[in-house]
Image (cartoon, helix red, strand yellow):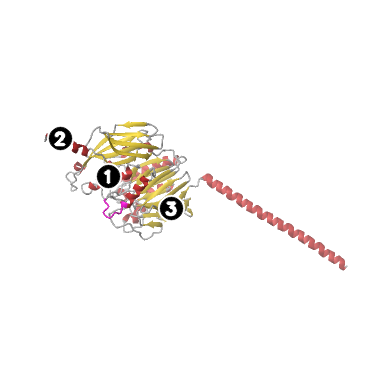
Amino acid sequence: MFIIIFLFLIESLQEYCEPYGVRLFLGHYYTNLKIDTDALRVVFNTKNQCNNQFQVLIKGDQEFNITTYKTKFLNMTDIYVGTKANIEYETYIHTFQIPIQQTSRILYTLKNNDKLIKEAQVKLPQLQQDTTKVLFFGDMDSRWLFNRSKQTFDWFEEQIKQNIEFDSLLFTGDMAYDLESDNCERGELWISRISLFTSQYPFMISPGNHDGGFDYKYTFLREHFQMLYLTEYDTSNYQNDFYSFNIGLVHFIQFDPVMIVYNADPNKYVQERLLSQFRNDLIKAVSNREEVPWIVVFTHYPIYCNYMDDDQCVNNFKYLAEFEKLFQEFHVDLYVSGHQHNYQRNQPYYQNHSVSYQMDGNIYYNYESPITIIEGAGGADYGPEIMIYDDQPYTVKQLAQNGVGLLQVMNKTHLQFQHIRVSTNQVMDEIWIMKIYDNDKENDNSFKYWISALIICAIVIVLALFIFIFVKYKGRKSKTYQKALDNLV
């Protein structure tokens, strides 16, 4: 009897040390800190602490085994003790940090003692690489009550089967609806199911208004999804909501203005901190623009959207006006958000007015303000189905099918954005953004000058020939006339 109980306890302990929710994140190697030992993070959960049981084997330009990892105990029960939330939830979150490799692909193997948990080949982005390929998607859950997000999961599964590579997945906010609901069971289900793709591709997120939790402190989100915040900006009444990173030719910036757009920042404390970080970051980014020419901002909150029953769509251009000034001043190229549950592309706009830009087919260039796109079509059971709203003056296109946004930077002058319908893997919208530098403009002006000069020369030559022929003809005619007169005489 004792042996049976002992074996049962051992089995229970092993079950509570079974990793789940494996997810990858980019580390501080990609931020201004450039920490070589923190390029990629492998993160997962267990029910127990499970000391010294896990290891990660890396095969890249070198082959090595990592046995050192960090463990964080998350006790949501204590956080909400004495509140109406009445949550009972505990978990252990384990993090391995992988150093940068010279190769762009690595194979990682996660083991629990000798038991294989996960093995995957991952594209490891480089700071110097010729192209960049990332996905944007958001406003998505994983319960599949109405199967609204199931198509997106199935699409990711197909990409993985076909060995399609992405440098990163950029999530535009609102996950699980909501992470702390049902005693955090929805959050547990979310991290378990999204590990289908988060264990294959680095997953970088922007918080949404449905991710805050019962106390609006985003505790579950912040602990489970490792955003690259700089903690020196944290204070007793403020948690940093800004981070940025580089992949190849692109500088990505994430910010969360939730307190601003919901009028919960009466003294503008949060706004001033965010604006200060933004300006400092953009100054550095612009100084490095010869090497990293593209600047892309992503967040949950659109500046311009079409659901006019939502205060966000009516007034965000006012709430985020100071940020929009920075985007124009530092010439941000693209602004991607979520929140509205569809896909929407807008023309360049500023302070709720159209601005100058040029377009040739589906190619944008010489734009004063960034092109803005909404990628909120991941699939959410919350609220109505994806729909089309009444067009506004800034609206170019809306789509009402589940989808993701594929951004591909081809080189220093050409960026492509496609919206893909996940049920058919069909490209439903495609644009290019083209940079024209001063020397290109000078060359263009020089070309136009020489064309004009050639045209003027041709006109002068034609006129000269005409005059010459006319004069010669008149001369002949005069001689003939004079000869006729002589004959008469």
Q: Can residue 324 be seen in this view?
A: no
Asked if the residue under mark 3 is in contact with the one under mark 1, i.e. CB atoms within 8 Å, the reply is no
Query: Given the image, on which type of amino acid does mark 1 rest?
Result: Ser
- Marks 1 and 2: which is nearer the front? 2
Q: Provide the residue designation for mark 2.
A: 6
Label 3 neighbourhood size at 10 Å, few (<14), some (14-19), many (20+)? some
Q: Disc 3 versus disc 2: distance between alpha carbons?
A: 61 Å
| Vertical side of 387 occupied by 410: above or below | above
Q: Can residue 449 be seen in this view?
A: yes
Judging depth in this view, the residue of 186 and 240 nearest the camera is: 186
The quadrant where residue 381 appears = bottom left
Please tell me which residue is depicted at 34% across the width and 45% down the height of the picture.
255
Judging depth in this view, the residue of 173 and 488 nearest the camera is: 173
- Please tell me which of labels 1 and 2 falls first in the chain: 2
Q: Provide the residue designation for mark 3.
A: 430
Residue 219, image x, y percentages: 25, 43
Q: Does the magenta stretch include residue 274?
A: no
Q: For the view shown, which residue lies furthest in the right direction?
A: 489
Q: Label 1's element?
A: helix
Query: Given the image, on which type of amino acid does mark 3 rest?
Result: Glu
Q: Provide the residue designation for mark 1.
A: 192
- Please tell me which of labels 3 and 2 falls first in the chain: 2
Query: Given the image, on which type of amino acid does mark 2 rest?
Result: Phe
Which stretch did the figure color magenta? 143-150
